[in-house]
Amino acid sequence: MRNLTLLTVPLLAGCAGRHNWLSSAGAEADRVEGLFWVLLIGAAVIWSAVIGAAVYAQRRQVDPGLEHQARWFIVWGGAVIPTVLVCALLIWGLVILRDITPDKGDLTVRVDGERWWWRVTYDGPDGDVVTANEIRLPLDQTALFRLTSDDVIHSFWVPAIGGKMDMIPGRETTLALTPNKTGNWGGLCAEYCGGAHALMRFDTVVMEPDAFDAWLAAEAAPARVAPDDPGFAVFRDEGCGACHTIRGTDARGPVGPDLTHVGARARLGAGIYAMTADNMARWITDTHAMKPDADMPPYPDLSGARLEALVTFLLSLDHAE
Amino acid sequence: MRYESDKQPSRFGPPGYAPRVIDQGSVWIMVAAPTLWALHFVASYVVAAVWCARIGPSLTEPRWIIAGMAVVCVALIVWLATQAVRRYGGVFVIFEEITESSERGRDKFIGHVSLLLCILSGVAIAFTVIPGFVFGSC
Ligand SMILES: [Cu+2]
């Protein structure tokens, strides 16, 4: 009995997980879940009926008088009913797919899959708001995601809320997500895209609409960087700005994630590490130990006061007034 | 019950006699219906691809073309099914096993298989048409 409990505890813990599509944290996941239960229970019923019929047929004496009926039973049970059921399931599945890929939403979020992180652009009230690796959504509103990729195929998935949908180079795909539970839900790339694929993740934070609006306004604001900030001096000297953008400064590199408010994100390296000073220092000096294959060069020579100043500067890029 | 194949001559006719492609004795009827499905499938893809690339983001018009082709194909399949019944003596449900090694037994078997393939192809064509009616856009 104890062994059984030990076995089931991790299973149950999995059900409550932030990556679990049975958490029903979104309208789209609920649609798919509905289909799942019908398929599962329906399959169980049909399986039992078929096995039951087989066992019954084995046990029974052959009765030539029933041959005629038996053949019609096979025609109905083996051909007509399955055809009708498969047809109904096809239509149901297609309707779900149509409904979760609309062309309008309450807000639009563009997500570009990159190896191995996410470029995120909101349609803000005053134009585009560019950020990365963290997606925030207002509760009970339908966010329309416009998904693209400029390298290989990725797949965008927030299991607890809905999805998934492929991101295909040269094409734009859409996906709706209507979260209905606040919280922090996990997102990930669901299509193998190269070395660090398994480390290509993101947080999806579902907020009350007011809090979301405040967050979006803060995210839209440029960074406040003091002209004599010693950390920014290191950032500039090391050439980080060739790849990274910090709005409000002359760092406008388009290659890596936008760092304007990197300190406001909960996680580092596309959703994989806590945003702490230690992790940040390691990320900069020993990038590939943190994330093998990441497309950022490590800076092993940075140390001491310069590294500390750079880390302090990056973590200060948050939303605080 | 009497089958037409009982009275018809076999396919070995007098010199110059060419058997019809779809007639008792010929097996082509079995592949005809699945071929119609395949043609419809390919044509649907071509119509949708050309339409989406050249004309526009809406599938509302080409889906009627696809449905129209489906009607034609299903009509041909229905005709094939009637041939399978009339000329081959095919039945939907076989109640007595076909064991005789005779022209008639073979015809009945071919008719039965063709009839089932006609039904399958009809359903498959419906499955090709349905997505076009659920999705309105390319
Ligand atoms: Cu991937």
Image: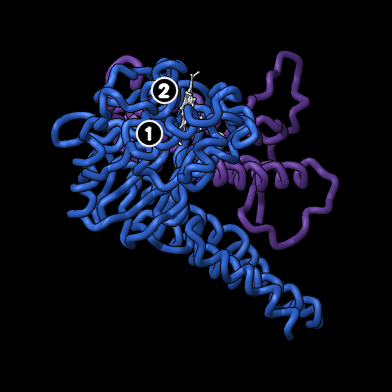
Q: Which residue is mark 1?
A: A313
Which image quarter holds the N terminus of chain A?
bottom right
Q: Provide the secondary structure element on which disc 1 rests.
A: helix
What residue would you read off at disc 2? A235
Tell me the element at label 2.
Answer: helix
Task: Say which chain is purple.
Answer: B
Question: Residue B69 appears at what percent x and percent y?
Answer: 40, 30
- In the rendered view, would you say B38 is above or below B74? above
Q: Give the percent coordinates (x, y) of residue A82.
A: 56, 59
Residue A282 x %, y %: 57, 36
Horizontal side of A250 relative to A93 (left or right) equals left
Residue drawn at (52%, 63%) of the image:
A39
Dot 2 or dot 1: first in sequence order is 2
Q: Amino acid at mark 2?
A: Phe
Q: Who is closer to the viewer here, A202 or A305?
A: A305
Amino acid at circle 1: Phe
Q: Is residue A226 left or right of residue B103?
A: left
Task: Looking at the picture, tell me which residue is in the foreground, A108 or B31.
Answer: A108
